[in-house]
Amino acid sequence: MAEKALLVDRMISDIREGKYKPNEKLPSENELADEYKLPRMVIRKVYERLQELGYIFSKQGKGSYVQNRKLQIPLILTGDVSFSEKMQELKHDFRTITLACEEIDYDSAVYHALHADIGEAVYKVSRLRIVDDCPIALHTSFLPKSVFNNIENEGQQITSIFQYYRQQGYTEFEPMRSQLSIVFPNQVERELLKCPSLVPLLHLESGCLDKKTGTVLEYSRIHYRSDCFTYVI
Amino acid sequence: MAEKALLVDRMISDIREGKYKPNEKLPSENELADEYKLPRMVIRKVYERLQELGYIFSKQGKGSYVQNRKLQIPLILTGDVSFSEKMQELKHDFRTITLACEEIDYDSAVYHALHADIGEAVYKVSRLRIVDDCPIALHTSFLPKSVFNNIENEGQQITSIFQYYRQQGYTEFEPMRSQLSIVFPNQVERELLKCPSLVPLLHLESGCLDKKTGTVLEYSRIHYRSDCFTYVI
DNA sequence: TAAATCTATCTTGTTGCCAAGCTGGCGAAC
DNA sequence: GTTCGCCAGCTTGGCAACAAGATAGATTTA
């Protein structure tokens, strides 16, 4: 089965180097099987893997084709510039869809990060980041009602959290230490981000403090598609 | 085929939550197939996926078993503390194996990063980082001979690059801006890091300057196993 | 001639059967 | 009683034959 992994590596190199162009038809499974003297099932598994990694797509009865390459956006991970501002600087067609704004049940991890008590109301604001019509990040913010007391009405309108801070009178804020990890998308994330199951997501957990009072304004979890970004730290 | 992805998600949750303990035998393919009323091939694909993600292993004639979970090491990505020093602080059994120290042919990316001219000699030092007998990172440093003129003899002995800087008289240095991306391991990386093909690697590209003169001391590429770390930035 | 239909042959997708490996139990041999 | 060997029945692994979809060209039909 090492043959399979080797062939996958090779095909990915070929696609990245442009030996196969976007939308170009790849050799049929039988052709490749003959060429490499391997059973067709091995080639099938290679093609299935390439599909789930997002490099190709296959159509029954027709063949397998190279998928269009994704855009590569350089993204500054540190610093106190908001996501919206970062994107607009890069002159991409950027927009945000607010998926939900609702009060959540008690969750120890979230409440602990916000320094919130059990009784306190906390709102979850989920937003989908879309660049050039391609969903590229899922942004979930947790906001305490004690800090943003009209959140249930205003939450839907938020596109940039930093802008919202300023509207609420918090002009100087400070990002908290971020935790970064790599995960694979679950079903909901696969659907929202329109990505196959083997596209790793860069998961960033962070928060934001009010500089004056030290109050925790926000705790956030962001999932970035790792195939759309190069990150700068 | 959505059934497959769903089952994979579910089994991963079950394993992470400890519903299946390490080395515990999982239900046989036929048992699961009967339980979920799915063809055995679907279950087979689920188990194959879990294998390549490193969650389980299968033995022909015996069954499928839960893999021991990997250690989770919090790793500070920024800052000017060396990898060796970071590890020793965390009281892990840490060691480094130097795989190679050799002059490289001209490579535009490397030479550009080092501000080196075409004629100049550049050495590549490859090191494997091992924590608790588990290889967890592959560290490739590119060092110009003009800065480290006895590198061909001393390269094999380097375990900590920062220590080597100091030995060579560079006492104050400054990390350059790092680029971060997510990749899957190629064959060499799979073998060295002893990881299956679907463990994402966190690829960190960086460099180091001498603070006094501004000379580029080093350009480095590090591949971390993403399943062994949580990163702090 | 032109349009419709059929068919051969290519593609990817699916399935069921058999091979290979392991284990425990039964029974023959000593 | 003990040991060895055989075999039935489980496991995972692999493959070949078949199904289903697409298409181009020949054939039929109006």
Image: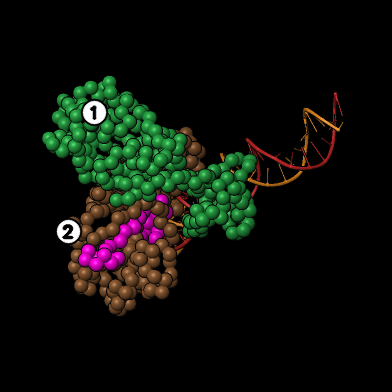
Chain colours: A green, B brown, C orange, D red
Residue A221: x and y in percent read: 29, 38
The residue at which mark 1 appears reads as A167
Task: Let me know if residue B214 is in the magenta part.
Answer: yes
Chain letter belonging to callout 1: A
The residue at which mark 2 appears reads as B89
Name the secondary structure under disc 1: helix
Query: In the rendered view, does C14 fall on the left or right side of B43?
Result: right
Q: Residue at x 51, y 56 (%)?
A: A17
In the picture shown, does residue C5 fall above or below A8?
above
Stretch of the chain drawn in magenta: B189-216
Residue found at the far top of this picture: A153
Instruction: Give the label, 2 or 1, closer to the camera.
Output: 1
Task: Let me know if residue A60 is in the magenta part.
Answer: no
Viewer-side residue, B77 vs B120 = B120
Q: Residues within 10 Å of mark 2 (few under 14, many from 20)?
A: few
Determine which of the numbered discs, if any, sits on residue B46 in the image: none
- Regarding residue B34, the answer to whether it shows in the image is no
Query: In the rendered view, does A146 fall on the left or right side of A55?
Result: left
| Amino acid beneath label 1 | Gln
| Both marks 2 and 1 on one chain | no
Query: In the rendered view, does A12 fall on the left or right side of B233?
Result: right
Q: Residue at x 56, y 52 (%)?
A: A20
Q: Residue at x 27, y 62 (%)?
A: B208
| Amino acid beneath label 2 | Glu
Image quadrant where residue A119 sits: top left
What whole-number distance in Å separates the C-alpha atoms at marks 2 and 1?
A: 44 Å
Viewer-side residue, B152 vs B37 = B152
Q: Residue at x 22, y 34 (%)?
A: A218
Residue A99: x and y in percent read: 36, 28
